[in-house]
Image: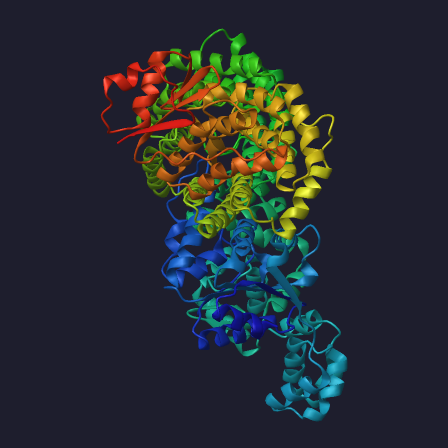
Amino acid sequence: MLSRAVEGAAAGRGGVLLLAGEPGIGKTRLLADARDLAASLGSVTACATCVMAGRPYWPWRQLLRAHGGAAVFDQRRHDEGSRAELFEAVDDQLSTVTGGLPLVLGFDDLQWADAPSLRLLSLVGRSTPVRPLLILGAFRDVEVGGDHPLAAVLGELGAAVSVLSIGGLDAGAVSTLLEEQGTDPRMGPAVHARTGGNPFFVREVVHLIAEKPEGLDQVPPAVGELVRRRVAATDPAGRRLLEVAAVAWTASDLALLGRALVIPAADLVGPAEDLVRSRLLERVGAGYRFRHDLVRDAVLAATARERREELSWALGTVLLEGGDAARLEEAATLLRTGVAAGDPTVAVHAALRASTAAMTGLAPELAATHLVWVLDQAALPADVDHVDLLLDLGEARRDAGEWDAGGDAFEAAARIAVGLGRSDQLTRAALGFGAGLSGFEVRPRDQRQIDLLRQAADALEGEGTDSIEAAYVLARLSVAVYATSASSQRDAYARRALEVAERVGDPGALGHALAAWCDVISGPDHVEERLAAADRIVDAGRVSGNGELELLGRRFRVVALLERGELAKFDAEVAAFAALADRCRLLVRWYVPLWHGLRALLGGQVEQAGSWALEVLDIAGRADSINGWMLGNSLRLSMWDQAGVLFPADVAEQLAGFVAGLDPDTMSGQERAFVLGLAILDDDNESMRRHLDALVAQGFGERDAEYLGTLTTCARACLCLGDAQGAAVVAAQLSPYAHLWVVDGIGAALLGSVEEMVAALDLLCGRPGAPRRQAATVELYESVPAPLLAKRARGWPDVIAAATGRPAPTPIPSPAAAEVGVLRREGGTWLAVWAGREARFADSKGVRDCAALLARPGRELHVLELAGGGEAPGGEIVKTCG
């Protein structure tokens, strides 16, 4: 299985394969063999070993350092989005270091990987099935329980990961190993029975047998006993060195170990060499390390708890005094472990420093670990604020993706802040829930967030003065209640936010307030107002130097330009957004492939649109963006709809499950419109009728961002059902917006012009001039070009004919090169059509004269021909003007 995975990677098929087994079972050797095979097949390889209490992202630093890319972890500021920025930078680096060749990454001892490294592994691993990247890893399954972070990663990776359990060698393989080590292979069955085939146990037994023939009988049932016997045989200096090295996890830095033992490093070289000869340590460059991690484990287990605490405190103190920022995490962990042997105040302050460094280093999981430990202390130093600790913990949990746990910390902080009358801390707690990129991601229907924001708004309002904080709180509140409150309440919050922001004069607060206001007026009645507000948001972002705010303004611009059908300006705005997102290195970049997918679908490039949609889902998955996931799938649904193809089986099953979970009596207008759209695609007339009637009865919902989409779906249902009465109602709602286009979400797709739907509904109702309006719509789509929409517009006469049983209206040629007028006698009246406008006239000599002239264009008529008073020609007279 391992060799097949490596060969698959060389052929462009990636994945994640993890080797699980007990210590010493041979996982490391298998990883090395896999690396050699990958290299022989032309893949680029890189391997790393995880250690406990190492720097954040230590294994990833090792991997990228091998290819000159470790700088992505350095000199990064901590702010919203920076962690996503780092993850994307690492992913980009993996794509560039290989020069287009397949890449195989190896991680040994994953059971000791830090939580941020595992989070990065999870995110990168999800994309491996669609790229030539194979991730190999090894971990001790006996140390990975259900609550271990690695277990969560395995669940997140799902089908992308395979776990291969490594068992012991069989008796024949043990005999072969004995022969390779110069020992009688006939002892294989006995050694196998004593060791269970664990290669490490076997090798250790071989060493004992080489020392004395009766060694096999002296092999203990656990390697720990074997190691303790060896340790007991060393001199006191060697035992002290092993003890401090075991506490420090690594043994390579004799200078550090010597300072902790108060022994000159030079005096430790001799004992270290003795330990190498006894196969407890091995040389690594100019230093040393344990020959096997089980050796370290056995030494640590044999060391008294008080001694371990003393050594931990000594090591932590030495590291802290050394001032090496790169080893602050290690120092704080050691001081926490050995706090019983030292001063708790020193350990608390070290943990807080390490927490701050972890947040700056985009490792919120490590920050949370330190903060939880500090909060668990019986007494805090006088200069440490309990509420600030809870707020820091909430932000760390939130940034680590632990939304519920972060919310618990924010709520706890808010309760104390309210009791103390600290509106600043209450505000920080309330805004803490609104994680995301300057308003790009605000979690909907989060009642805890809403309650805290309302508390903070009331507290700030009670102070009677305007503030930047109040503007932010009110703006965030307007967005947070969007799915739960009436539009009047959202409107009130947004207006107050805008008024406060205008008075305080802060560009950032003004930009956020304007963004909230744009969400409130997201419907078709306010396109121009939103476009003007978007310009102001962009300006506010530039003035305040906030690139994320500028991106938010540009996002509003994109949607408004689509609604106006200004595609050239839309293309320019997308290019500006992409350039800024690249400079900010934010994972909001999933908007860019989304909009490229919209453009591809509009141009009829269905396969290309599908590729863009998959890229959206990939980036949004790594950014943990709910919006990105929803809109990426919306693009796919629009693609299948407009292309007239069936949904894939798995998607159809998911959609069926979603519909089954809705309550027909309580579903929202947006949900009902979605279900109606599925009924249209399924040709389910009964379901169409039911949901169309319900939407008409509801008045089609609020005139928000979904209003035109809902009406468009209702229009399609009317056409499919041949419902002229419903068509008249829907057309009356759509007609005021005939100049706009229908946009799905935040630019997931263009669903067509409103004019197309009005013209088709008029065809169904038999209104004069409808064929002309339909022809003009087809011409519009052909000029874009939008071939799929043009095909749909041309097909409405046939849809109406099939639904009503009436002959299809006669199509009118596209007026691409000429204007066409009609003059036709209908009984005692005349119908005149010109440039899409109609008029009727009573029969008269003047109208008959015009008809006679138009009947023979380009020919002279004698006045007597017109004065004769004869009957005018019948039928339809068409005059074409070039």
* Apparent side of residue 300 relative to residue 325 in the rendered image (left or right): right
- Classify 783 as above or below 86: above
x and y, in percent, of residue 393 in the image: 57, 35
Could you tell me which quadrant the C terminus lies in?
Answer: top left
Q: Is residue 367 left or right of residue 152?
A: left
Furthest residue toward top: 464
Residue 160, located in which quarter of the rendered image? bottom right
**Apparent side of residue 530 relative to residue 201 in the rendered image (left or right):** left
Colouring: rainbow
What percent of the width, then of the height, locates residue 437? Answer: 46, 34
In this rendering, would 249 be left or right of 515?
A: right
Q: Is residue 239 visible?
A: yes
In the image, residue 303 sits, relative to residue 627, either above or below, namely: below
Q: Is residue 850 above or below residue 158?
A: above
Query: Which image quadrant: the N terminus?
Result: bottom right
Task: Give the residue drawn at x 53%, y 49%.
Answer: 116
> Where, by quadrant of the figure, is residue 563 drawn?
top left
Q: Is residue 382 visible?
A: no
Query: Which of these two is toward me, 38 or 534?
Result: 534
Give the percent coordinates (x, y) of residue 266. 43, 67
Q: Nearer the viewer, residue 377 or 566?
A: 566
Front-most of residues 716 and 362: 716
Q: Is residue 324 above or below residue 104?
A: above
